[in-house]
Every structure is written in C-alpha cells, then in structure tokens.
Amino acid sequence: MKNFFRSLSVMLGKQPVKPIEDDYSQGAQELHSLKRTPEKRKQIREMRRAEKDLPVRRKFMIRRWASVLFINFLF
C-alpha cells in the first residue's frame, strides 16, 4: 500500500524518492547481490559479445511483411 501512495503522490507532482536498501524484501536483496557478482558480470559480457558476432538474419522480418501484405490483400 505504501508504494501505491508513493506513486500517487508522484503522479500529483511530488518529486520521486529513490528507495533505500531497507525497502527491498529479503528475496529481492539476495537476487540483486547475485546479479552483482564479478563472475555473473563477466558471463553477461561474454554473452553480449557472442550475440554481437552472430550474423543478422532477416528471415522473420521477410515472413512478417509477407503475411501482413497477404492479410491486407484479403480485405
């Protein structure tokens, strides 16, 4: 309920306040700590590099446009 009133006050013009660590639940704090480990950061960096090296495939885009045009020609 606290978040509801906080978001309502922001909607009415109050400046937003960054939540403090104590506002997060225990599960959320554990999840954030897991995301911040150096091994996890290294793994994410490697995954992003590997994804950049993949060739660009336009197969889905071509199929999507073909289906859009086909449906439009029906009407």
Image: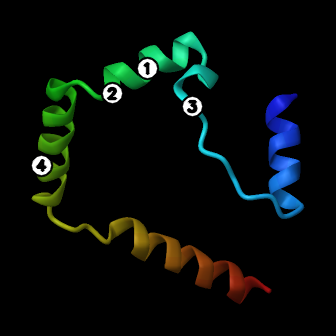
Residues packed near mark 2 inside 10 Å, few (<14), some (14 to 19) or many (20 plus): few
Query: What is the x, y in percent for residue 32?
Result: 41, 25
What residue would you read off at disc 2?
35
Q: Amino acid at mark 4?
A: Ala
Number of numbered tags placed on the structure image: 4
Residue 65: percent from left, percent from top: 51, 79
The residue tagged 4 is 50
The answer to whether marks 1 and 2 mark residues whose Cβ atoms lie closer than 8 Å is yes
| Residue pointed to by mark 3 | 20
The mark nearer the N terminus, 1 or 3, is 3
Q: Is residue 57 above or below residue 42?
A: below
Nearest-to-viewer mark from 3 and 2: 3
Q: Quadrant of residue 38?
A: top left
Percent x, y of residue 39: 14, 25
Between tags 4 and 1, which lies in front?
Answer: 1
Asked if the residues shown at circle 4 and circle 1 are in contact, with their CB atoms under 8 angstroms apart, the answer is: no
Residue farthest to the top? 26
Q: Which residue is tagged 1?
A: 31
- Separation (CA) of disc 3 from disc 2: 18 Å
Choose between 71 and 58: the one closer to the eye.
Answer: 58
Q: Is residue 64 left or right of residue 5?
A: left
- Closer to the camera in the image, 47 or 26: 26
The local secondary structure at tag 2 comes to helix
Q: Residue at 53% across / 12% down in the picture?
A: 27
